[in-house]
Image (cartoon, rainbow, N blue to C red):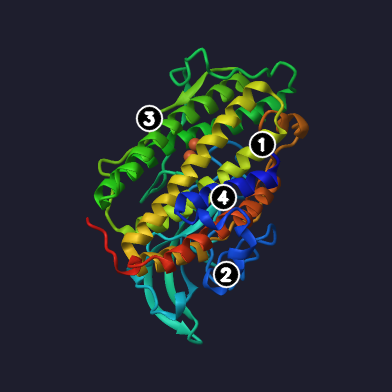
Amino acid sequence: MHEITFRRALLARLLRATGAGSLGASLAGAVGAACGSNVTMDTASAGSGGAASTVTSSASAGGGGAGGQTNLGGGSPGDAGLCGPVQTCFPEADGSACPTPESLVGMTAYLAGCPGAPGTCPRIEKVLSGPFTDAGTECCYFVEGTSIPCYVGRTFFLDEGVVKAELRPGRSWCRDPACPRPDPSALPAATRRALGEAWARDGLFEHASVASFSRFSMQLLALGAPADLVRDTHAACVDEVRHAELCLALASAYLGRDVEPSGLPMPAAVEVGADLAAIAAESALEGCVGETVAAVQAQASLLRATDPAVREVLAVTVEDETRHAELAWRFLAWALDVGGHPVRERVMRAFAGFHPAPPTPEDLGGVDLALYEAHGRMVAAEARAIADRALADVVRPCLCGLLDRRRGAPGAADARPTA
Ligand SMILES: [Fe+2]
Ligand SMILES: [Fe+2]
């Protein structure tokens, strides 16, 4: 399916998932206009969404994936590091009161003194003072932040930052005879190595996504979420096991040695929590943005790939990530229904704070880029351009459709979670 057709079909599918599907697939332009200045989200210049970007606080995302563990910028994620104090400001949501300092902790946000390494995003760790208002339109705070690697999708975050395993020799992931075996025999050594490293990196993030969905399933139970969300989250968790297997099988083939994940470094206690607004905001970025963009990027990679084994992996990824995106949007619709205004405000702030990072330089010296693409990978700049189109043509109109539906949903603002 052509990229534009795919984005339209995906938007229609996601709108249906949120209950706004009757508005139809032609909604992108119309709904974008309808939400106007109520929804601030930086979607760059691509696509038909046409965001009115009055955002003064922004998060960024980096990386350069091709499969289900996709990211929005370029390069490899770096390690966490502390920074600040710095000032950060948010537009007042619907002219309402400024967010409480506690509600900002854990949010990704643009922190001018917290640039971090390429492929990292600043996250607020501590609010030192505020809010104080700027011309009555912005809420400003002094904060301390951490730069965290910003793979999106179901990345597994703990207080310590992103958690993922290391690569080690072994073939306990994907022993199955059905595991993909691409043909790397004709590939130059540098291209082969770059492909192996890229697929291995994705494999480790897919592996960590299993833990992320596991925690999300517990959060859903704590929130009293309906059975269909719990069931589909567990199914998505199993999908991520398969994605990790597939990516690591590809990595093993290109690297010429079998690789598997080490143990996932897990602390003694993992916080689950039952703060609906916080979980909804997290899911808005990790799921609604991350998995939607992942589906679009995987489809773009599928269109370019020619190796049959890689194409099979990408076809599975496109379908699975589309379902995961639907799940995230369905959860958001439910959270807005039961949580009302506080959840809506927090979610809008999360989207307003989202801003993909510019693509960062990546070292692909000596790599045959045509072969790199034929085997399912794309350069960071292209991945970022595709992400921009996904944000403009799918994520933003879907958010607008969802918020529009919420505004018209009787009693939604007064509903409260049952747990
Ligand atoms: Fe995945
Ligand atoms: Fe996923």
The reply, left or right, for residue 412 in relation to residue 402 is left
Q: Amino acid at mark 2?
A: Ala
Which callout, 3 or 2, points at the residue further toward the start of the chain?
A: 2
User: Looking at the picture, does residue 406 appear above or below residue 260?
Assistant: below
The reply, left or right, for residue 172 in relation to residue 290 is left
Name the residue rendered at 67%, 17% in the picture.
Answer: 183
Which callout, 3 or 1, points at the residue further toward the start of the chain?
A: 3
Give residue 45's position: percent from left, percent from top. Answer: 69, 62
Q: Which residue is mark 3?
A: 263
Marks 4 and 1: CB-CB under 8 Å? no
Tell me the crowding category of disc 4: few under 14, some 14 to 19, or many 20 or more residues within 10 angstroms, Cα based: many
Q: Is mark 1 within 8 Å of ligand 1?
A: no
Q: CA distance from mark 3 to mark 4?
A: 39 Å
Q: Residue furthest left?
A: 419
Q: Which residue is mark 4?
A: 12
Q: CA distance from mark 4 to mark 2?
A: 17 Å
Checking the image for residue 34, the label placed there is 2
User: Looking at the picture, does residue 195 appear above or below residue 95?
Assistant: above
Quadrant of the drawing holding the N terminus: top right
Give residue 91's position: percent from left, percent from top. Answer: 50, 75
